[in-house]
Amino acid sequence: MATIWDDLTLFLTVWGTLCVYSYTFKDNPFWKWGTNTLVGGYIAYSAISNIDYMAKNVINPMMTKVNWVHVAAILVGFLWYFRFWKKYYYLYRYALAISVGSGIGITLAKSVSSNIIKQVASTMLPLYGTGTLRGDFDNIVIVVSVLSVMTYFIFTIAHEGPVGKPIGWISKVGRWVLVITFGIDFGNVIAARMSLFIGTVKTLMLPQHQTLFAIIGTVIMIYLVGTELAKRRKVAPEITAP
Amino acid sequence: MAESIWTKMSKIDARWLFLFLWIVVLAPFIVSISLPMKISALTNQWYNYLNDMPDGSVVLWSWDVSFAGWSEMEASGVAVTKLLRKLMEERDFRIIMIGHRSECGPLPEIVLKDLGMHPDQTAEYGKKYCHLGYMAGGSVAMINFAKDIRSVMPVDWWGTPLDDLPVMDGINTIQDIDLCIYIESGGTAAITQWVIPYGTKLMLCSVQGNVPGQMPNLQAGLIKGMLGGLRGGAELEKLTGFLGVGNINITAFSSAHLVIMAFIVLANITFFIRRARREI
Amino acid sequence: MAGIISGRIFSGLFLLISAIIVLAMIQYAKTRGARIHLRRLAALDAIDEAVARATETGRPVLQHGGSDPSGADTIANFSIMNYIARNCARRGTEFIVAARSISGLPVIREIVSGAYEAEGKLEEYDENRIIRFGSPEQFAFASFFMDTVATEKPAFTFMAGGLSGEALTLAETTVLHGSLLISGSSGQLAVMFAASDYFLISEELFVAGAYLSGDPLQMGSLAGEDYLKMILWVLGVIGVIMVIFGSKWLLDIMKL
Amino acid sequence: MAAILRRREIPIALTAFFALYMMIVYHFDYPWFSENSQLTKDIQDFARILGIMALGLGYIAIVRLHGGYIARRVKHPQHWFWSLWLLIVLTITTIVGLPIGNFGMRSVQLQYVYNSILMPMRGAMYAVVAFYIASAAYRVFLARNKEAAVMLILASIMMLTNAPVGELLGEWVGATGSWLLTVPSMGGNRGLRICGALGSLVLAWRMITGRETGYLRGAVEGAGE
């Protein structure tokens, strides 16, 4: 038995999607409704999901056994909100400093390992003797690509003189490797954004949404095209006047 | 000198292009055309690695997809969950679902409800699979989770203590987890927080835009498999036989690509002709 | 050595070495900054030509104000803003900044007014005309930026700092209105590379900022980074040679 | 006392302590100084809960921003009425989301909110860029020079590899596309990843030694999809 709320959900799903897409025609009230509803709803949603986590996993267990580390963290956590109080703004920096410091502390050493050491180690490939011509060629291309792109981003050596000249040539190779890389990235960015669009179109074309899609779509289009033509007609007569 | 047709073409209002894109993407939903689709090497590598896992493996099914990324990742999200359920039933796998962003409490819940695995729908919940819900705190939470799961997630998404869930017996740290499948739309911290310190086996399901950026990690062995975007999801559906959203969208995926390529070719032809006629 | 966890030694040593090199280079830059030579990027010559072109055609120069002022992209954008503002003040070309971040506004006012003052043209500095605030929200700022481009028709546009999904829209509008576009970013690389006349690829944006500001902290950091790159470069080459001769010695050490 | 707290030295020292402690302890397992010791777990637990406590910052910032728009009855950047509507939606979602009565994260009412508003519109907001890629593909992605020409050709090969329709052109398309993705593009992305990691490594050392204090000014604002 579909309640009023289910019908409202069907309507809002189609209505919201088309309001956001109306921006591609021009900035208009439907878009303003969509973006403001979304910002308001999403900010509240992420705040309450964090509150729900805290309630369930931190505060509830404390009813039985008090965890003093958590209590201290919650108290210090209130320092965040001095950011909005001009007089005691500086207290906010303590919470931020601890948060940023621990963020750096837990990531830096592991990022060095995964993004630098392991990457360089995996580039140490045999340039021949892998058994297949294709395998040798691939390894040569990988090694050349990685080293030339790194050379491209060396800035303290000018591309002149006995040392600088070869570095200049290598970085030109690096530039072409980047062109290839951006070409491939670009092809995948297009695929990603198109998939998002197709995902929303699939939702709009679900059986229960199709009629709503047709009606709301037409209403919004009529409004947009109408106001556009009205604006042009208002502008046009001044031009034709002698 | 009247504007040549080429100048007019280069000055077309963008909205005609948008309308054309709408038509081309809507068409496959009205007239269903199905194109042959080859399974790519990446998807095969991903699928084989999961299948080669021994019976009784514990899989951490990590969710890091935003509501926005869900339009692209729904195909792989649902297909992987169905595949894991089959492995759970046939080969005694254990599945632990967890969310790394605020949207990933409800998103897995929606998929569980669609597949009839929701605790309100079945008593099976908790025996071999469970959903821990949203784990707030980002990377720092991932470290504490790795060291002691119950210190970060004492209860599951619906508030049941982990000790009351049979699936969690004997699972205390990340080392008790044999494989982590991570579905993401905005990058992952699992490599730096789980793979590097604890050697966790990690497989990714990423939005297509992140696939090239993760190729170095795949070649370096930091991730064991990469399932890319809508195309990867559709291929996995075909491989596992659980046809769904991926195979509906994949035709529109092709037509949208054709439109973009047609636009690029047309634009460059117009550009070169206008340059030849000194109009630029 | 029971206490040291295996598998983390080599990366820990590299971390230590990186600290030593970077902090040493920053100190060196502070004391004898002149010695550090940053090669002049072609983009800076392109900026000079673009401003000259704007002066000839009498059309304004537009710059994206960047987003959060503590972001690395936006910090580099501020140094380039100072350079372009002085260039425009010297030539008497109209300069416009489309600002997006509320906390960034005072910094932008300081930079642009300082630039006009340095060129002795403070009387031409009309804040309301030059610095225009859009909105912190992504797409609201996009439509504001596009309206500014449509009405002002800039001859040259510079964009850097907090570019995300909407950046392509901004780039397309500027190119459509006949503006030369130079941009720089550490994200959205492929799309911006394709849409811009000239694109500063991630590190290049920071180098341009450091080169123009001459700030020893940034110069020293970039010099330190370059040395680390060279160490890794040499390590990579040695590793490849050793692997060709069948020796896994270096690889095993790196796995320590 | 306030004068001392106002200075930046203490926050910088706190950043340095938390960063250096966690970074150094990661490498050691001595009984008195270990990655797996209870002390390390407690410090990391403290930092985790502290991070979660910042959940209200964005919330309050939005309420202040749009509250200001309403108070000043602004017309630019948008009419204040829309800010009023934003705060109404914010309040409704908050009430429905808080665990009062049968409301809460898992309540049916909140499911209506994210099913009908958040999921469709967030997806559409991201997908708007697909339209701009389409119009940019038609007007801006031109083979103006050699580099742009090579880039467009490779992007087309990648598109034909991704889209099943590409297979109609023959086997070579998919083979070339996946080779480009897994060999040269992988090398280029690895080079970018190494240089990017070195960049953040240098920035981190500047922050730890207090030479970079920009982060103390404010949280990131104005990020986008």
Image (cartoon, rainbow, N blue to C red):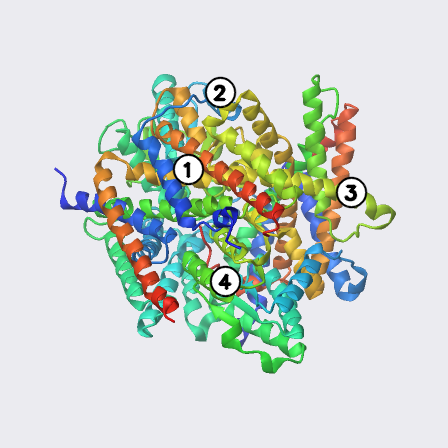
Q: Secondary structure at mark 4?
A: helix
Which chain is disc 2 placed on? B
Dot 1 amino acid type: Ser
Dot 4 amino acid type: Val
Depth check, mark 2 against mark 1: the one in front is 1
Left or right, residue B129 beside residue D19: left
Q: In percent of the image, x 55 and y 40: which residue is there?
A: B269
Q: Residue furthest bottom?
A: C123
Between D60 and D27, the residue placed more toward the observer is D60
Disc on res. B48: 2
Which residue matches tag 1? A195
Depth check, mark 4 against mark 3: the one in front is 4
Residue D34 visible from this viewpoint: no
Q: Secondary structure at mark 1?
A: helix
Q: Are marks 3 and 1 on the same chain?
A: yes
Q: CA distance from mark 4 to mark 1?
A: 30 Å
Q: Residue furthest left?
A: A1
Q: Are marks 2 and 1 on the same chain?
A: no
Quadrant placement of the N terminus of chain C: top right
Which residue matches tag 4? C149
Which residue matches tag 3? A169
Q: Residues within 10 Å of mark 4 (few under 14, many from 20)?
A: many
Q: Position of residue C55 (x, y in %)?
A: 64, 69
Q: Residues within 10 Å of mark 2 (few under 14, many from 20)?
A: few
Q: Are marks 4 and 1 in contact (CB under 8 Å)?
A: no
